[in-house]
Image (cartoon, rainbow, N blue to C red):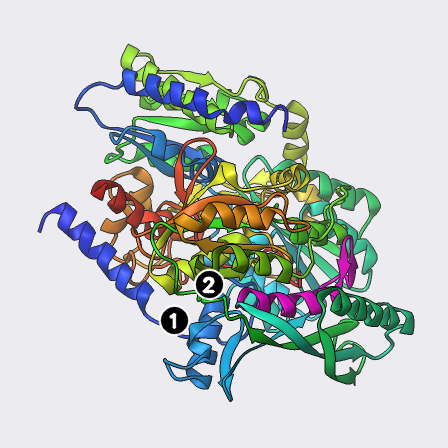
């Protein structure tokens, strides 16, 4: 066997190992399991999905929301927990995130958000005005997103058993008849869109924690994505193949999940990715790639090439999405990989994050 | 961003790539080592290797401070971190480096009070805020970070902080380079010298590379144009038969280094007789420990760390990979026992190590052949 053949064989072994379902073998949960990268994937695909769902079950599609059909109605159901620190940060707060996070998981699944439940875990000793502020934030965000809060729960735990306040919301939405989106529907040739400048939520939280002693005015991008989704569905209909909100792990993690689910590759043109100068500067100083930084009001969409122009125009007409851009496209080879054409003219792989340097951003 | 974007100009990059191509001798292949992990990072971030001709290969050197920490030192750190009274502080990228059984992140999940800091001064602040706890800083890095640890220790001593101490893993860059160069099967044609280290030590310590071992060195900045220009300067030395230390990074690196930083280092530290490097084994006089005047701040003394040596698995061939003798995929444990999730050797520990990069990105090379 010559050297090239042996190299191919080694690569083949790696390929086989990678395509196997990950097994959850860790002795304990570490913060890496919550970071949205490889460890989270192992936890979800290696432990949770096999326990809760058959291979063909709804959960196994790993969409942002599960789709169920009942009496002819197509409903989307999702849930999300919020543990962000600090509770308040420029541009938003935990209450606002809790509403928008769940609303957005429904929206990017192609469902019009209808109603939410809100559960609160409160730490003994929490000051009432802190709670009052968040209750108000939840109410305002729900009104802005036009969803009703229809159920809820409260628990109080002893001091130290939670950090001030943890929130969990669940949401139900009605599947939009115009939508036929799925994480596994990316097709070669599809154009990739983002709905605005990336990395603002994560950067705002990082700076709000004051660990870096950097002063910069950057606000979280938290908002409801339904208006953006509505515009995309009107403009592209069935040519809109997939949407994801780029939360934990950022645009890079979302793209990695999608290429795996669809068995395709994507190429991102770094120079076309909208990043505000202030996020670019903060990332530069902290040595972080904004592609991996969390967003709370940005989506990534894959649109068939013939509908890409009108989809982009429709997106840009939505308030807050004026800087939406086409950042790359879907390709056939090499399956499962996200490639970046750097602004310097080189090419590199944008892999999944192994762990997150910054826990508790949402 | 002014003053940075100028060094990332894609058109100028293409011009340099063209000049590099013109400098190559037909039929010859070139292996150039970038010594410093910071360069490796830039090379990936900007896709610089993608701009180079196929017969110019960049070999990632031993200059990643996290990757070179051997398992036994991580175990020592975990042993200290697990003590009830200790708040253990370290840089974030150290948290995931595997010891023989656990990482510091695992130890944290098991109950140890492990905290990530961005500067040794943050650790000092924690010590002031928690006078009832022992605060330990796990110091890593080359000459680049050693001065800030030294200054922190000076300040701790001046303030008379009794609850602060340091596990010193600072290493020096010249001994591992010499160890690589000593090897008879070395296949490297030149070195991209470490820019940040050189701001401290200057250019002089690298003179032995051309002088004793006949390989050119160009001390380089970290922006993509810096690196391409340095590669071109190395190739020009090779084609014109010159062999010397050149400084591409003159905007930052003074020839004589930073005498004040060197002074504070020599006050606070002394050379260890020998130190173990992951994948490279023991190298004499390659690391620093606290000098007798600062020994009271040495956490290894204060807590009596186990100091058990954990041997790298025999099959690990990181040394050969670093020397450019074998490619990552030719290592016996590559992709089987040694993967990014369960790394054995230094080259697999950091995502920027040669083996981890090949593991993750090998398929791209394959794709390029198809096109």
In the image, A226 versus A139, the foreground residue is A226
Choose top left, top right, bottom left or bottom right for residue A114.
bottom right
- The correct choice, above or below, for B337 with respect to B213 in the image is below
Q: Does residue B251 belong to the magenta stretch?
A: no
Counting the numbered discs, the total is 2
- Image quadrant holding the C terminus of chain A, namely bottom right
Please tell me whether residue B321 is drawn above or below residue B26 in the rendered image: below
Could one spot residue B206 in this view of the protein?
no
Location of residue B132 in the rendering, given as x and y in whole percent from the top left corner: 81, 64
Q: Is residue B365 left or right of residue B263?
A: left
Q: Residue furthest left?
A: A1
Q: Please determine if labels 1 and 2 lie on a single subunit.
A: yes
Closer-to-camera residue (B243/A154)? A154
Mark 1 Cα-neighbour bin, 10 Å: few <14, some 14–19, many ≥20? some
Q: Which mark is residue A38?
A: 2
Circle number at residue A305: none
Write down the chain letter for disc 1: A
The stretch of residues the image draws in magenta is A84-109
Residue lying furthest bottom in this view?
A71
The x, y position of residue B325, in whole percent, is: 25, 40
Q: Position of residue A54 (x, y in %)?
A: 39, 84
Is label 1 in contact with label 2 (beta carbons under 8 Å)? yes
Could you tell me which chain the residue with mark 2 belongs to?
A: A
Q: Residue at x 26, y 45 (%)?
A: B367
What residue is drawn where x is 58% and y is 56%? A231
User: Magenta stretch containing residue A96, yes or no?
Assistant: yes
Residue position marked by numbered label 1 in the rendering: A22
Disc 1 secondary structure class: loop
Q: CA distance from mark 1 to mark 2?
A: 9 Å
Q: Secondary structure at mark 2?
A: helix
């Amino acid at each position: 066997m010559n050297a090239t053949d042996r190299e191919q064989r080694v690569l083949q072994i790696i390929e086989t190992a990678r395509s196997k379902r990950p097994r959850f073998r860790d002795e304990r949960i570490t913060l890496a399991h919550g970071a949205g990268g490889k460890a989270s994937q192992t936890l979800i695909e290696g432990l949770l999905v096999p326990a809760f769902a058959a291979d063909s079950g709804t959960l196994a599609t790993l969409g942002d929301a599960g789709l169920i059909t009942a009496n002819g109605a197509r409903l989307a159901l999702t849930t999300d927990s919020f543990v962000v620190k600090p509770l308040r940060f420029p541009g938003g707060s935990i209450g606002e995130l809790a509403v928008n996070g769940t609303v957005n998981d429904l929206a990017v699944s192609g469902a019009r958000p209808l109603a939410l439940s809100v559960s609160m875990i409160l730490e003994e000793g929490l000051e009432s005005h802190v709670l009052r502020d968040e209750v108000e934030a939840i109410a305002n965000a729900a009104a802005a997103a036009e969803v009703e809060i229809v159920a809820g729960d409260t628990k109080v735990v002893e001091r130290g058993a939670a950090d001030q306040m943890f929130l969990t919301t669940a949401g139900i939405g009605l599947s939009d008849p115009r939508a036929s989106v799925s994480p596994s529907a990316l097709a070669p040739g599809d154009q990739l869109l983002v709905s605005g400048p990336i990395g603002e939520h994560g950067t705002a939280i990082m700076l709000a924690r004051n660990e870096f002693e950097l002063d910069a005015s950057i606000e979280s991008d938290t908002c409801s994505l339904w208006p953006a989704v509505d515009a995309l569905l009107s403009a592209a209909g069935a040519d809109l193949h997939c949407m994801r909100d780029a939360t934990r792990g950022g645009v890079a993690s979302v793209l990695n999940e999608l290429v795996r689910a669809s068995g395709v590759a994507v190429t991102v043109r770094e120079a076309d990715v909208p990043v505000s100068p202030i996020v670019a500067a903060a990332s530069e100083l902290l040595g972080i790639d904004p592609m991996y930084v969390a967003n709370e009001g940005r989506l990534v969409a894959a649109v068939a090439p013939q509908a890409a122009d009108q989809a982009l125009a429709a997106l840009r007409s939505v308030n807050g999405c004026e800087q939406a851009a086409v950042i790359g496209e879907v390709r056939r080879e090499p399956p499962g990989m996200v490639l970046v054409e750097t602004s310097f003219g080189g090419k590199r792989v944008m892999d999944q994050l192994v762990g997150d340097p910054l826990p508790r951003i949402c | 961003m002014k003053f940075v974007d100028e060094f990332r100009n894609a058109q100028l990059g293409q011009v340099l790539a063209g000049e590099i191509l013109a400098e190559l001798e037909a039929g010859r292949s070139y292996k150039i080592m970038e010594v410093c992990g910071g360069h490796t990072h830039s090379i990936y971030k900007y896709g610089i290797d993608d701009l180079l001709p196929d017969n110019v290969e960049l070999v990632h050197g031993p200059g990643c401070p996290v990757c070179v920490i051997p398992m036994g030192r991580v175990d020592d750190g975990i042993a200290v971190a697990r003590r009830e009274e200790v708040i253990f502080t370290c840089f974030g990228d150290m948290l995931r480096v595997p010891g023989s059984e656990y990482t510091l992140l695992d130890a944290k999940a098991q109950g140890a009070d492990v905290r990530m800091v961005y500067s040794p001064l943050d650790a000092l602040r924690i010590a002031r805020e928690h006078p009832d706890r022992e605060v330990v800083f796990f110091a890593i890095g080359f000459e680049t970070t050693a001065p800030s640890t030294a200054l922190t220790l000076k300040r701790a001593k001046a303030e008379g902080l009794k609850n602060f101490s340091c596990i010193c893993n600072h290493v020096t860059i010249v001994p591992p380079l010499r160890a690589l160069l000593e090897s008879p099967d070395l296949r490297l044609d030149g070195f991209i010298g470490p820019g940040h280290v050189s701001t401290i030590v200057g250019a002089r310590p690298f003179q032995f590379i051309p002088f004793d071992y006949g390989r050119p060195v160009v001390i380089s900045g970290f922006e993509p144009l810096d690196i391409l220009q340095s590669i071109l300067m190395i190739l020009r030395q090779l084609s014109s038969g010159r062999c010397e230390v050149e400084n591409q990074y003159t905007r930052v690196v003074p020839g004589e280094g930073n005498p004040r930083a060197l002074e504070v280092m020599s006050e606070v530290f002394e050379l260890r007789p020998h130190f173990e490097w992951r994948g490279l084994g023991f190298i004499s006089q390659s690391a620093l420990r606290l000098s007798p005047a600062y020994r009271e701040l040495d956490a290894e003394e204060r807590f009596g760390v186990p100091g058990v040596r954990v041997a790298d698995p025999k099959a690990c061939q990181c040394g050969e990979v670093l020397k450019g003798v074998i490619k990552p995929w030719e290592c016996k444990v590559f992709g089987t026992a040694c993967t990014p999730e369960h790394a054995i050797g230094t080259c697999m520990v950091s995502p920027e190590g040669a083996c981890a990069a090949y593991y993750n990105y090998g398929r791209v090379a394959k794709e390029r052949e198809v096109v």
